[in-house]
């Protein structure tokens, strides 16, 4: 299975404010009303795995942005609102067993979302690729994208895009991986 994080962060490496707010992301000028490549990226994945906190943040939005199954990784969340029937489901356990379960469902390319989830994948050396969009804002504090990791992990930068005057999207692939990106 190919695992890919697709996430935005501030110039100083935060994915949300200290209170979890991501309003700074939605306040970015968007003169062309673009999704900045998200839909194109989404075509390349089979499912989404996110943590409880990310799911709860998305739940507060006025729309559900996912057209593929979302697996919510949580040991404390027991049930989802019925509006998520056939859209999202709870999954728990260690990451390797979760990946095995998802492979059994013919999921070959998994979108990994959420700060803690991404950190967990990194600590287990299970994250193949990262697509990180850096927004031209300094938050000063908040929830870090990477936080503290147990070891160094090397990635190769294979593509960079400048988007409007506000963003840079960098594409990274885990060094020494044999699977090629489909992007």
Image (spheres, rainbow, N blue to C red):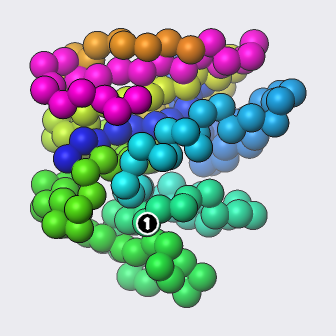
Q: Position of residue 111 (x, y in %)?
A: 39, 47
Q: Quadrant of residue 27?
A: top right
As drawn, the residue found furthest toward the bottom would be 82
Q: Is residue 178 above or below residue 165?
A: below
Can residue 142 be seen from the camera position used here?
no
Q: Position of residue 149 (x, y in %)?
A: 25, 30
- The residue shown at (65%, 31%) is 36
Q: Give the residues in magenta.
A: 162-183
In the figure, is residue 166 to the left or right of 175?
A: right
Q: Is residue 75 above or below residue 34?
A: below
Secondary structure type for disc 1: loop
In the figure, is residue 6 to the left or right of 110?
A: right
Q: Quadrant of residue 96?
A: bottom left
Q: Quadrant of residue 29?
A: top right
Residue tagged 1: 69
- The residue shown at (86%, 27%) is 31
Question: Is 65 part of what is drawn in magenta?
Answer: no
In the figure, is residue 36 to the left or right of 105?
A: right
Number of marks present in the image shown? 1
Quadrant for the C terminus in the image: top left
Other residues around mark 1 within 10 Å, as few (<14) / some (14–19) / many (≥20): some
Q: Position of residue 75 (x, y in %)?
A: 30, 71
- The residue shown at (36%, 13%) is 158
- The residue shown at (62%, 57%) is 65
Q: Is residue 45 above or below residue 172?
A: below
Question: Is 164 part of what is drawn in magenta?
Answer: yes
Can residue 125 be seen from the camera position used here?
yes
Q: Position of residue 165 (x, y in %)?
A: 75, 13
Q: Foreground: 42 or 157?
A: 42
């Amino acid at each position: 299975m190919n695992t890919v994080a697709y996430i935005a962060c501030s110039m100083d490496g935060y994915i949300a404010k200290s209170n979890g707010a991501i309003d700074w992301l939605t306040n970015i000028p968007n003169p062309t009303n673009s999704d900045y490549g998200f839909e194109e990226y989404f075509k390349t994945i089979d499912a989404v795995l996110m943590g409880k906190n990310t799911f709860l943040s998305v739940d507060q939005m006025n729309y559900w942005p996912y057209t593929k199954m979302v697996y919510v990784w949580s040991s404390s969340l027991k049930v989802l609102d019925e509006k998520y029937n056939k859209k999202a489901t709870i999954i728990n356990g260690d990451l390797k067993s979760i990946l095995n379960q998802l492979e059994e469902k013919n999921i070959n390319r998994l979108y990994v979302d959420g700060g803690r989830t991404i950190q967990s994948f990194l600590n287990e050396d299970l994250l193949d690729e990262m697509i990180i969009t850096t927004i031209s804002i300094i938050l000063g504090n908040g929830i870090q994208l990477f936080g503290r990791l147990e070891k160094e992990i090397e990635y190769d930068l294979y593509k960079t895009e400048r988007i409007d005057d506000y963003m840079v999207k960098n594409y990274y692939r885990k060094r020494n991986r044999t699977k090629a990106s489909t992007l």
